[in-house]
Amino acid sequence: MENNHDVIVVGAGAAGTIAALSAARAGARVALVDAAPFPGGELVCGLPLDSCVNARGEWIQGGILKDLFDRLEAIGGYVGPVFDWRTMYAVCVDPELFKLVIIDALAEAGVSLHLQTMVDQVHTDGAGRVTAVDTVTRGGHLRLSAPIVLDCSGHADVVDKAGAATEISDDSGLLQPISLTYRLTGVDFGPYMEFVRDNPGEFLLAENPVIGLTPAEAALKSYEIGLPHLALSCDGPLLGGAIDSGEMYPCTFVFTWPTSVARGEVGLNTTRVAGVDGTDQAQVNAAWPELVGQVKTGMAFCRSNLPGFARAELSAVAPRPGIRETRRIVGDDRLTDADVIAGRKRDDGIAKGSHHVDIHGAGTEQLRIPVGNGGSYDIGWGTVLPQLSNVLVAGRCLSSERGANGSARVMGSCVGMGQTVGLAAARYAERGLSDVRELDVVELRQELRALGAVLDGTA
């Protein structure tokens, strides 16, 4: 058994990677466990980072993430915040260069990587305390032990295996579809942006009232910026007609964003397979052929129909499907749909979110409700506290209503939660506490501010 760690982080996605860095930079000895062969999760799959900047252009994430962005910019991999002129900003990055930044940062912090490692069992003392985590690797079984465990698995795997309460979906029983993103290089941005300017009815534009423009005015703004962060809409004649004719599969949009200006590369989010329970790996495995088929169909549609895409070539496919929704913990507090839509602020806020309520359905179905006044909402401390004494969570498994989770699940908010729980875990271990509820959230917020986290002063 390895018991030379202060903190075990399960899940090396956006939340877990930042949580591990946060704990290690605060002086903790950290083990980072993930089934994937590489840390970073969606940070390095090609997606832009939503919920880092609100619709008003205010940064709502800082600290460790801003440090990583600075490192990325220094090696030419940072595109930066780009408005989609629909409802939000997203920070666009080159995921290949981001991989290098993340590995360097983890190594510098002294994080012990346990990759290609599955959590098998979670042991408790029967009174709500996790005592050990059993893992399985190619080399055999390994038991890890530490004073505190961070569940950043996305699925609340640690909480669930420890026997604490979780929930999934709502009364509908529905789960959002899974998707597979991909990237095309050799795209000529100029002709595509001219198409946007001249055909605003083809795109999702000016949905957020804070924008204060007509779709045609928003299209012109997008053209002037020159970066293809846009959603070609199924309600427009081009994509809608292709769906009706069978040239394209049913989808809400063909969403593009720039991943490298130098390479003329864009990421695309177009695919979706509904009816998949992301906690059942057999179901996810079975969805791969359909997802790959949609990637091929989507590429053909773009080359044939979108100006500037005729010579585009496939440069990458995400290494795993993106899963929008699985288990959520039942925590000490709960982020509600109303909290998100109203942009509620709170005294115990430990991270922020600004993404719209976003519930994808089958085919062309999608619910989108923006945060009020183009602002942000606070994620309360109690939403990351499961019914266990030495476990904290970060990421989409936070305690939340389904609609609220459809906002807080995106990378910016996950990173914010990750920085908080990482620091909290380091202080818990350092002080020899017996319950995470003994941590002083006022003190925690003060330390987070000193580290550059954004907790106040935004709409």
Image (cartoon, helix red, strand yellow):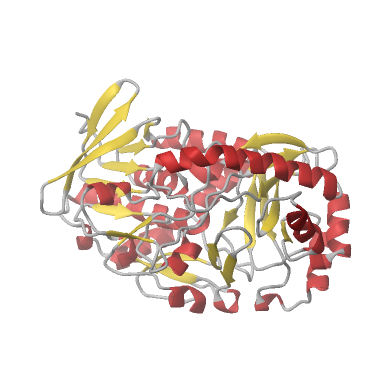
Q: Name the residue at 73% across, 68% down.
A: 205
> Which image quadrant: the N terminus?
top left
Splitting the image into 4 quarters, where does residue 218 fall? bottom right
- In-front residue for pair 101/198: 198
Q: Please state if 321 lies on the left or on the right of 193 as rendered.
A: left
Q: Name the residue at 81% across, 55% down.
A: 226
Q: Name the residue at 83% across, 60% down.
A: 196
Q: Name the residue at 73% across, 55% down.
A: 243
Q: Please state if 160 lies on the left or on the right of 125 as rendered.
A: right
Percent coordinates x, y for residue 441 in the rendering = 30, 65
Pick out the residue farthest to the front: 245
How many numbered marks have been drawn onto this rendered protein structure? 0
Percent coordinates x, y for residue 143 in the rendering = 22, 32
- In-front residue for pair 272/314: 272
Percent coordinates x, y for residue 294 in the rendering = 65, 44
Percent coordinates x, y for residue 334 in the rendering = 34, 69
